[in-house]
Image (cartoon, coloured by chain):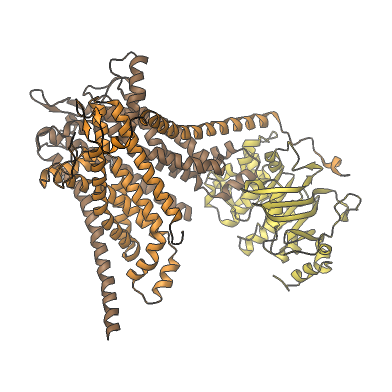
Chain colours: A brown, B orange, C yellow
Amino acid sequence: MIRHFLAKTLYWSDAAVKKLSFLALGTGVAFLLLMIVFVLRESSLGLGFAMNLFDFLVRQPWAPMATPPSHGIFHAWISTLVVTGLSLGLAIPLGFGIGLFLSEVAPRWVQQVMQPALEVLAGIPAVVYGFFGYVTLVRNFETWFDMPAGECLLIAGLILAVMVLPFVASTAAEAFRGVAQDLREMAYGLGVTQLYVMRRVLFRKALPGLFAAVALGLARALGETLAVLMLAGNTVAVPHSLLDRGQPLTALLTTELGETVVHSDKYQALFASGFILLIVVLGINVMIWTLKHRFLERSHA
Amino acid sequence: MHNAAVLSPTANMTGSETYRLSVLRDRLWRAALWFCGFIGFLLPVSIISYLVFEGIHRVSWSFLVDYPKGTPLGTQGGIWPAVEGSLALASIGLLVAFPLALGGGLYLSEYGRSQRFNETVRFLVECLAAVPSIIYGLFGYAFLVVFLKFGISLIAGGLVLALIMFPILLIAIQESLRSIDDAYREMGLSLGVTRFYLIRRVLLRKAWRGIVAGIVLAVGHAVGSAAPVLFTASIYFSKGGLGLDRPVMTLPTHLYNLVSEAISFDQAFGTALVLIAGLLIFNASATLLRRLGGGSAQ
Amino acid sequence: MIVPMEMTCSYAPEGDHEDPADGPRIFDVRDLSVTFNGRSVLRGVNAMALDRQVLAIVGPSGSGKSTLLRTMNRTLELTLDARVTSGDIHFKGERLYGNGTDPRLVRKRICMVHQKPVAFPMSIGENVLFGVRFHKNWNGRTKDEIIRSCLDRVGLWNEVKDRLSDPASRLSVGQLQRLCIARALANDPEAILMDEPCSALDPVSTARIEELILAMKPQLPIVIVTHNLAQARRISDQSLFLYDGQSLEQDTTERIFTHPKNGRVRDFITGKVG
């Protein structure tokens, strides 16, 4: 009797755990979806968003104090673009090189040293990178380039490149390692050099993974906040050169949000730019997902 | 060999001019790759040693446990309220996120029976893991601080960090459960036990290393990030003491303030070193735990 | 497992011995030992291959057949921790493991066909040209001439001539294996090594590969590893029997399959041991 009861409770508790775990999953995911909806809600109400998209993105300056106030984010996304492009332009070649090195060239003990080193690089908080960039580069730029204040897009891009590097490198290494050993043996078996195999076989085979590495780096660089906030100079002027100061989107959000009246036009403009950032990053992620799936399917076939 | 001379061709094992050129190119390329690897090693080592070198003389026991002092405030004294605030925020985040992520991970890998449902949810979670933390900050500000009227407080910041940690934890938990051989499940369930029993007695014991790795990743991410707590939980200075409805100082935002307001670079070096060292020690001890801990390795 | 000394090696490595079938030795494997991470895999192997003949390496699985084959064009060292600890291989009188021998040039002259065919991520035609583009052994021929002649030799030309620019991954496994052979032939090799080239193939494709081996034999020495004794009998002139990393016996295929001298070889051939 008792045993029967016990068994019943056990089975019942299994069902309960199943329901609870589903509930947990549901709660978590629901909150995350709520986030997207809420950012959208806070942004588009009253802005006539779709109508003014061109004004918002290109034509108007960011001048909330002017009469009448205007809230365009041209300077911000131009800055974001410059900083992101610069950082990826540096991090992608170097990261692919490190990936190739780790997967093809490095002896085992070197790999064992490099792996944690890259993890450390990835684990350093953004604010520390910002601080590091400030005390090393910003001060020196003031003397090297005779600038009144050293912050500029170039520095932000450089530091951002270092921040993105470990992600690009380890994803690229994974992509190269994923190429079947058979293929390598066959290629080397024809008496060609490593460079030739990398160029003709490895790169093509690892291509989806390399795209994913780029996309991952791009998403990281776009959303990075603290370092660019501290290094890019935070000015609403549109930058004209790499040594100009600028204000990437994330820096704009961080600078302005705390001092903004809730549900004012400016508040909505800030959330609208946040929403654009969110959509871009989600789009990149959809791309990574499809690449990964195609990659998996191909390696199964 | 008596017949070698007959067969030996004019081509020999040293190769032609073009071949030698391509071997040279290969050498140069390999040297370039070694150089890339060297840079990848040099960067973390030089950044960390620079911070240690510049910050070590600032860090002492009293720096850790003292309150910010001096005029302007923060030029003297210690960083205790920031340490306290960072720990409290991360703990609240973990306390909220871990049960949810564990349940979610278990459901996705053990209970969920619909492939399509599982993949859709996993896709959503992966997308959200990639969302920049500043967006979480925006949401936390608009929803928790303003809409729910939590104000800038420990609880609002903790919940935002929980949201950031949830997808990271969920992915780690699901992956480590998924890497367990299905044979364990079949063998276990064929003995007539419930799934929960199997999970408790077998699967979690096999998966705990991966779960610990996920916790380290999530906590490291949460402790280090300033953007989401900047306008949900943090203030410039607090006299210490924690309350769920009160704002706190955190290490990253304190460091940010010290630098951006140019209060004290000396103190900033100390704060950065404490933050970095704390994260590294936390990481290393978790690695040690995983290496030494009982249970079978995967 | 340790094999008593008197059971090992049947074939005298030194030159005073008159070779059977009066061909010159192309490969001369002398006292070759190989370790994997300290574990001994080949122990003092002696073997030889003659010109314009097929040498079959047979023996139970794990006896080191593939390892021996891979030492013969220096692809062994692609495996981490694999090391030749003693002995050498002479190819047409040149030492394969001598100082200053470039492994890539060895591989160019001695090509390998693997068990599982793999397409490089490029078109069928480019697959054939893979080695040529590196070694530049055009010898006055155009791209198309090389592709055509190599594919012709493996009997693939008529099947693929209209889709040379298609990705090679679209071929069937049997076709792919022939493409791999064409890829090797494009290198103008002086010998071909084959590592169980038919084990992934169906009987029809297997027959085609066997025909191909017999057709190539007049121009090239071929060394083939096979676990299929019937196949060894069908296509090889010489057979080498490996057991537990040692060469037990080498002789003409005819003699080894009818009058093996070694007891273990007899047991294996008559099916007493697997």
Instruction: Reply above or below: A78 against C71.
Output: above
Question: Considering only vertical position in the picture, is A243 above or below C271?
Answer: above
Q: Is residue A68 left or right of residue C128?
A: left
Front-lying residue, B20 or A234 = A234
Q: Residue at x 27, y 86 (%)?
A: A1
Question: Residue C218 location, x and y as percent?
Answer: 78, 50
Q: Position of residue B285 (x, y in %)?
A: 40, 48
Which image quadrant is residue B58 in? top left
> Would you say residue A242 is visible in this rendering?
no
How many discs appear?
Answer: 0
Rendered position, C253 above or below B243: below
Return the residue nearer the eye: B127 or B141: B141
In the displayed orientation, state which residue is furthest to the front: B62
Which residue is at a point 26% across and 71% down the rendered structure image? A15
Q: Can residue B253 be seen in this view?
A: yes
Residue A5 position within the rendered picture, expressed as x and y whole percent measured from the top left: 26, 81
Outermost bottom residue: A1
Which residue is depicted at the point 55% across and 53% down?
A: C171
Taking depth in this image into account, of C94 and B202 the one nearest to the observer is: B202
Figure quadrant of residue B115: bottom left
Residue C145, percent across and down?
A: 65, 40
